[in-house]
Image (spheres, helix red, strand yellow):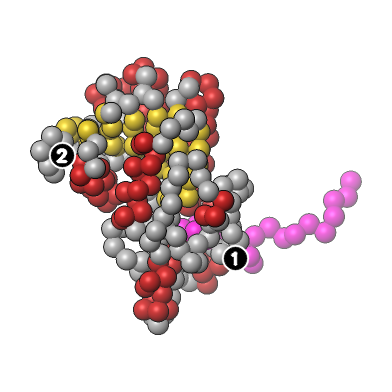
Amino acid sequence: MKVALSGASGNVGRILRVELQRRGIDLRSAGGMEPLTPLHDGEEVMHGDLRDPAVVDRMLAGVDVLVHMAGTSLERSLQEIIENNLVALHQVYEGARRHKVRRIVFASSNHAFGMHAIDARLGLNAEVRPDGLYGLSKVWGEAMARMYWDKHGIEGISLRIGTTMGRPPENFRQLSTWMGTEDLVQLVMRSIQANDVGYAAVWGISANTRAYYDLKEGNAIGYAPTQNAEDWASEILAQPTPLDPIAQHFQGGPFVTIDYTQEQQRPSKAQGLHR
């Protein structure tokens, strides 16, 4: 099985380039605009702008599964979000049609649900409530994955990734959203190897005691996390939280605070409509 990994120069991409190869995956790693240096023997590398169909064709030729980790991963201008998370994603899916790629594993995000309060526990069918333009782009991406399965038969798995950095959790919010490296690798391997998925969404976090998401309901790929951010809870809870009061209230944390309209600055509540 040939697997392509986009976004291979990012933090998650660098972890996967090493760990997938260790598990016998025949990997083609695609970075951004700068050339990549292979991290191990047998790793095929490439780079380029995924808005360019010719670059997409080089990435997907002969590929069975694409693990799509590329795109803007922070809150940025609308134009940047559109170019990297919408236009490039559409080119990727159209390339998958041309090359008959069987499955795309799409890096969605917890920020597609970030405006839920922290005391809500979300199932896989939870209402989308994006906390910004980045989260909004992930709602669009999940919908695209669903559409390309329904219309074109390309299997899609949307990984609603929490906080994965290759290191322990660092603050109170991450006690809920953290995903350890072992669980990250398991999540991606199950996404590559699971049979007859069709379209599915999966929460991409560890088995955290304080998780915002209901992991007990199961998922279509058999992902069963084993790590738990609670192992670092006593150390984290002994420190003051770096989050402001708004960020502390919503699952999206600091993304919510960006360009947030305070209550006193919002339109006044209507007392009733009169002709």
The segment highlighted magenta reads 251-275
Q: Are marks 1 and 2 in contact (CB under 8 Å)?
A: no
In terms of depth relative to the viewer, which is nearer, 43 or 147?
Answer: 43
70 drawn magenta:
no
Q: Residue at x 34, y 42 (%)?
A: 189
Q: Which residue is mark 1?
A: 119
Image coordinates for residue 259, horizontal then vertical, percent: 50, 57
Q: Residue at x 50, y 30 (%)?
A: 198
| Quadrant holding the N terminus | top left
Q: Residue at x 43, y 52 (%)?
A: 224
In space, the residues marked 1 and 2 are separated at their CA atoms by: 42 Å
**Element under label 2?**
loop
Q: Earlier in the sequence, mark 1 or mark 2?
A: 2
Vertical side of 99 occupied by 134: above or below: below
In terms of depth relative to the viewer, which is nearer, 172 or 19?
Answer: 19
Image coordinates for residue 274, horizontal then vertical, percent: 88, 50
In terms of depth relative to the viewer, which is nearer, 191 or 144?
Answer: 191
Mark 1 crowdedness (10 Å alpha carbons): few <14, some 14-19, many ≥20: few
Q: Quadrant of residue 5?
A: top left
Image coordinates for residue 60, horizontal then vertical, percent: 29, 25
Q: Is residue 42 left or right of residue 101?
A: left
Number of numbered markers: 2
**Element under label 1?**
loop
Vertical side of 1 occupied by 80: above or below: below
- Amino acid type of the residue that numbered disc 2 sits on in the rendered structure: Leu
Disc sitting over residue 36 in the figure: 2
Q: Is residue 150 left or right of residue 9?
A: right
Image coordinates for residue 174, horizontal then vertical, percent: 42, 65
273 drawn magenta:
yes
Visible in this render: residue 87? no
